[in-house]
Image: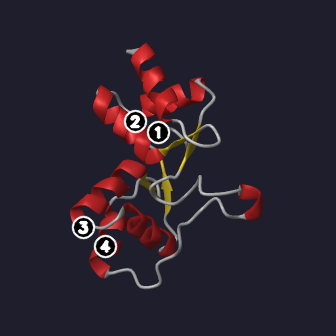
Amino acid sequence: MTDRLAAAVRQAVGEGNQLPCPAAFKIAGELAVTPLQVGEMADELGVRLSHCQFGLFGYGPKSEGKHRIVCPMSDVPADLESALEEALVDGRLPCAAAWEIAARFRRPRLDIANAAEGLGIRINRCQLGAF
């Protein structure tokens, strides 16, 4: 499996030796491995993760402050706010929980990150192991 996983990661690597988050999750699904295994393989191969689906990293040069696209939502709907607060673990929102909330509310993942950002909630425990 390790050889297949390494080959899949290498094949999905894009510009700048980066593996976009959506491609990493696609690999995990196709090979029936965990997203963390894909992230660890990327690390092992010296491949950087990019294009976080929550907009938290991988969109441009960090030195220029362009690495993030998340933007605080100014008016978070009450039901979404409640869902986010209920999912907190030690005051932070695990990535997997944020994915589940996005699916439940039928909203793009970036919307969930924007809502969390607007509420001052930090997302952690990246399923790919990036943070």
List the single residue furthest toward the right. Answer: 63
Of the image marks 4 and 3, the number of the one nearer the N terminus: 4
Q: Which label is found at residue 35?
A: 2
Q: Which residue is mark 3?
A: 105
Would you call the spot at circle 2 few (<14 residues within 10 Å), some (14-19), or many (20 or more)? many
Q: Residue at x 55, y 41 (%)?
A: 14
Q: Which residue is mark 4?
A: 80
> Between marks 1 and 4, how big is the CA–CA gap?
25 Å
> Between marks 1 and 2, how big is the CA–CA gap?
5 Å
Q: Position of residue 60 (x, y in %)?
A: 65, 57
Identify residue type, mark 1.
Leu
Q: Which residue is mark 1?
A: 128
Location of residue 15 with respect to 53 vertically, above or below: above
Residue 125 seen in the current view: no
Circle 1/circle 4 CB separation < 8 Å: no
**Which of the pair 81/57 is nearer the observer?**
57
Of the image marks 2 and 4, the number of the one nearer the N terminus: 2
Circle 1/circle 2 CB separation < 8 Å: yes
> Between marks 1 and 3, how big is the CA–CA gap?
23 Å
Identify residue type, mark 3.
Phe
- Mark 4 residue element: helix
Location of residue 46 with respect to 129 vertically, above or below: above
Of the image marks 3 and 2, the number of the one nearer the N terminus: 2
> Between marks 3 and 2, how big is the CA–CA gap?
23 Å
Identify residue type, mark 4.
Leu
Q: Position of residue 83 (x, y in %)?
A: 30, 67
Of the image marks 1 and 4, the number of the one nearer the N terminus: 4
- Mark 2 residue element: helix
Based on the displayed image, in which of its 4 quarters is residue 69 positioned? bottom right
Q: Residue at x 32, y 81 (%)?
A: 77
